[in-house]
Image (cartoon, rainbow, N blue to C red):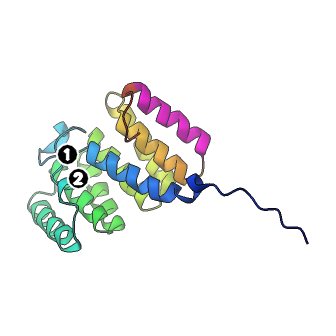
Amino acid sequence: MLQVLRPFSPSRRFIPFFSVILIAQATSACAISGKSHDNTSLSDANPVANSLGSNSTLLQQSNKWAAKWQKNPSDAGIAINYARSLRAAGSNQKAVQVLQEASLKSPKNQAVIAELGKALSTAGQYKQAMQNLNRAQTLGKPDWRIYSAQGITLDKMQQYARAREYYASALNLKPNQPSV
């Protein structure tokens, strides 16, 4: 029996790996500081991205942000950083819960809604992720990081042609951006 072999495609083999890298870059690129409430932007400094090291460091960061969040769960910046630390530690569902609560308190905060979309994508809830990322894009001026996250999510959904359209939109706003 003749078996037809498909040509080896290293790019397909590494798509999940590169998706994780792109998510990490997008997450670190759209950083948020401890600023409060609805004026939180997508480009503030990200203390979580600088701490991605050992598991003990991740746990320490997560505990630090958890304590801050317990004291002030209405602060959008704290909620975002707490959720990012949870995602970095692999607690994707808890990150989604934190961001869902933050989105109820700050329903028009582009950064919160975008981060919720990214967390949902990381948790494998792609349709809800796209809904939130689409919504985030309408809450402020178009943001290349959100377009990139939409492309990543569509790649995970194996909708490669649509994903390329979002990557192109991201590159139109931020030409030569290596994380796109």
Q: Does dot 2 land on a helix, a strand or a loop? A: helix
**On the image, which quarter does residue 144 sit in?**
top left
Q: Residue at x 19, y 71 (%)?
A: 59
Q: Residue 118: image x %, image y %?
A: 38, 51
Alpha-carbon span between mark 1 and mark 2: 7 Å
Residue located 53% across and 47% down the image? 154
Residue 38 vertical placement versus 58 (above, below): above
Q: Decide: marks 1, 2 in contact (CB < 8 A)?
A: yes
Could you tell whether 98 is left or right of 159 in the image? left
Q: Residue 80 — which label?
A: 2
Q: Quadrant of residue 119?
A: bottom left
Q: Which mark is residue 117?
A: none
Q: Amino acid at mark 1?
A: Ile
Q: Nearer the viewer, residue 41 or 54?
A: 54
**Which percent across, then down, holds residue 81?**
20, 55
Magenta-drawn segment: 159-172
Residue at x-position 49% and y-position 31%? 168
The residue under label 1 is 32
Observer-nearest residue: 29 or 3?
A: 3
Vertical position of residue 113 compared to residue 54: above or below: above
Towards the viewer: 171 or 127: 171
* Mark 1 vs 2, N-terminal side: 1
